[in-house]
Image (cartoon, helix red, strand yellow):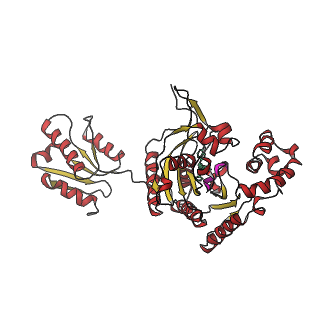
Amino acid sequence: MLRAPRGTKDILPPESHKWAYLESLLRRLSKLYNFEEIRTPIFEYTELFSRTVGESTDIVRKEMYTFQDKGGRDLTLRPEGTAPVARAFLERGLAQGALPKKLFYLGPMFRYEKPQAGRYREFVQYGVEILGSPSAYSDVEVILLAVRIAEELGLTGTVLYINTIGCPKCRQAHREDFVKHISSRAKQLCKDCLERLETNPMRILDCKNPACREAVADVPLVKDYLCDDCQEHWDTLQQLLESLGLEYTVDPTLVRGLDYYTKTVFELKWPPLGAQDAIIGGGRYDGLIEELGGKPCPGVGFAVGVERLLLAAEKGQKPLNPDVSIDCFVVFPGGGDRRLAQAGFKLVNDLRGSGLSSDFDPLGRSMKAQMKHADRLNARYVAILGEAEFEQGLVTIRSMEHGWQKQVSAGQVLDFMKEEVSGGSK
Ligand code: HAM
């Protein structure tokens, strides 16, 4: 039997109802914070990611699904959404329109990672980006949206970690002292970090290896090397968070796994998730558009893994409980009098025409088996059109929630059902 590739999954009902519920919640919040949707291609030129996410990052070095198409082009299934949004912003001339541009996306991303709970090779991200605003208010705006998502899902006890990693100017000053310090502990470093020491030393802060973590324990931190502009941004950000009473923890080792960040980086963690507890990650990327060949244009945003959100929601205070019921199941005998079956089928269509979700049994099973099926489909009402009803021009309506049964004339059944479904009698 052929199986789905490792690290991917099928989303079947009833889980798919939870996905739809969560997606509509995310769309509703996007609207509330005035983010408009952008959809970018699933694959892009590989160079887009190597230039922006960074050659020395795990994503680019180890995790990209890269291939050559039949025309010999180097392409990559997108591992994240920020670089494609920045590419589209530039290519489609959005920089010339009204700024800031506030965009959101919701779609699959691909990373060749070791699969485990909350970590997949194909996963769905919801992300937001504000392009064209250098203001710390925009950083706080996206942080507030991230926190709001967790709140709406009843995730109590999330922890907001923030840090500043400055701009290239501050990092230049910091790098020399950082490298000097780390070089004296080079023996402790893992193979990857020894390489990082040459290519992108700050990335060492991101390593989970215990010996490497020990090596960076008292290393010089960028926050002590900030230029005036970065310092002001960092101070304003914290003052704003405090003015809103939003609790946060400064984690000076938080550098994030992508190279395009400048100034603010943040993560929202939910400890009950265990190893993959970073549900939301983001930050500012003031050099990204320029890196792609545009005029300087600041940006800030975050992304959240929808699978992780779902896992968290299931463990949280407010497990998702989407409505999986249908309004009405029409029971009628499949065999025998063809006019009766046709009237039953017409009733299903008329109910649907009136906006009531409805279904029936196309397999012609017994009335009892059909009642069972109606129950399995979580029908709120069953409309029974048996021979006796048909002859008298009636339909029997049964409320599956309340157990009552009433006979209604066939001509009035649509009005009766509309009234019932929109909150009628008990
Ligand atoms: P990221 O931290 O790489 O940032 O990913 C953001 C979120 O995507 C993570 O917090 C996690 O919830 C989810 N995620 C990442 N990898 C996986 C995986 N293999 N399986 C399941 N979920 C995963 C970014 O991607 C940046 N583009 C975020 C951003 C937007 N920064 C600024 N704007």
User: Which quarter shows the C terminus?
Assistant: bottom left
Measuring 77% from the left and 40% from the top, which residue is drawn there?
Answer: 192
The answer to whether residue 54 is magenta is no
The answer to whether residue 281 is magenta is yes
Magenta region: 275-283
What residue occupies the far right of the structure in this picture? Answer: 184
Judged left or right of residue 110, residue 235 is right
Q: How many marks?
A: 0
Give the prevailing secondary structure in the magenta stretch.
Answer: strand
Is residue 110 shown above or below 392? above
Measuring 63% from the left and 55% from the top, which residue is drawn there?
Answer: 272
Quarter occupied by residue 323: bottom left
Q: Is residue 337 visible?
A: no
Judged left or right of residue 201, residue 278 is left
Residue 330 horizontal/vertical position (percent): 24, 46
Q: Nearer the viewer, residue 367 or 138?
A: 138
Judged left or right of residue 331, residue 284 is right
Residue 423 horizontal/vertical position (percent): 29, 63
Q: Is residue 292 visible?
A: yes
What residue occupies the far left of the structure in this picture? Answer: 392
Residue 300 horizontal/vertical position (percent): 58, 57
Judged left or right of residue 295, residue 251 is right
Residue 265 horizontal/vertical position (percent): 66, 57
Q: Nearer the viewer, residue 117 or 195?
A: 195
Q: Nearer the viewer, residue 94 or 61?
A: 94
Measuring 78% from the left and 40% from the top, which residue is drawn there?
Answer: 195
Is residue 50 shown above or below 262? above
Q: Nearer the viewer, residue 123 or 77?
A: 77
